[in-house]
Amino acid sequence: MARAYSEDLRRRVIAAVEAGASCRQAAKRHGIGESTAIRWVSRWRRTGSSEAKPQGGDRRSHRLEAHAGLILDAVEARSDITLAELVELLRERAGAHFAIGTMWRFFRRRVITVKKRRAMRPSRSARM
């Protein structure tokens, strides 16, 4: 993931625009993209802030974590339940809508895996 530009650069671009340069001129002078300068100045005028917004991270898993007890109980009751069936269960019982990938990440965070078949010893004549 790319890093955010420095706060110093942001302030210099905004100061150049406030001093009378256009956003495009300030962008060219400081070696950044025109749309970047336009967004920075627009945000500065709207909120008064030039700080970078937070990047990345999980900001929505708490929605699924609220139903952790229901999910884990369903898995304990029926060990071969599929992710699609869990999604449907949440939709019916809790009225919550989640994608299968969200459910998969829920189990990945808990290091819960299910093997679909037993391990077999390697065969020398066939690909496994």
Image (tube, rainbow, N blue to C red):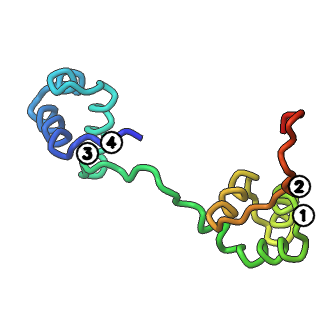
Nearer to us: label 3 or label 4: 4
State the image quarter where residue 66 is shown: bottom right
Figure disc tally: 4
Q: Which residue is mark 4?
A: 3
| Residue 35 vertical placement versus 110 (above, below) | above
Position of residue 76 in the picture relative to residue 61 (left or right) = right
Choose the circle earlier in sequence order: 3 or 4: 4
**Which mark is on residue 97?**
none
Query: Residue type at mark 3?
Result: Trp
Q: Nearer the viewer, residue 109 or 4?
A: 109
Q: Residues within 10 Å of mark 1 (few under 14, many from 20)?
A: few
> Comparing marks 2 and 4, which lies closer to the viewer?
2
Q: Nearer the viewer, residue 101 or 126?
A: 126
Residue of label 1: 80
Q: 107 or 88: nearer the eye?
A: 107
Point out the tag, 3 or 2, that comes first from the N-terminus: 3
Give the percent coordinates (x, y) of residue 120. Answer: 87, 52
- Name the residue: 84% across, 55% down: 119
User: Mark 4 packing: few (<14 Cα in 10 Å), some, or many (20+)?
Assistant: few
- Residue flagged by tag 2: what amino acid is it? Arg
Secondary structure under the numbered disc 1 in the rendered image: loop
Q: Position of residue 22 (x, y in %)?
A: 19, 25
The residue identified by callout 3 is: 44
Measure the C-alpha gap from mark 4 to mark 1. 42 Å
Residue in view at x 66 percent, y 65 percent: 111
- Amino acid, disc 4: Arg
Q: Report, in whole angstroms, how far the alpha carbon at label 3 lies from the one at label 1.
A: 53 Å
Determine whether label 3 and label 4 are within 8 Å by CB. Answer: no
Give the residue type that dot 1 points to. Asp
Nearest to N terminus: mark 3 or mark 1: 3
Question: What residue is pinned by disc 2?
Answer: 117
As drawn, which residue projects farthest toward the front?
A: 124
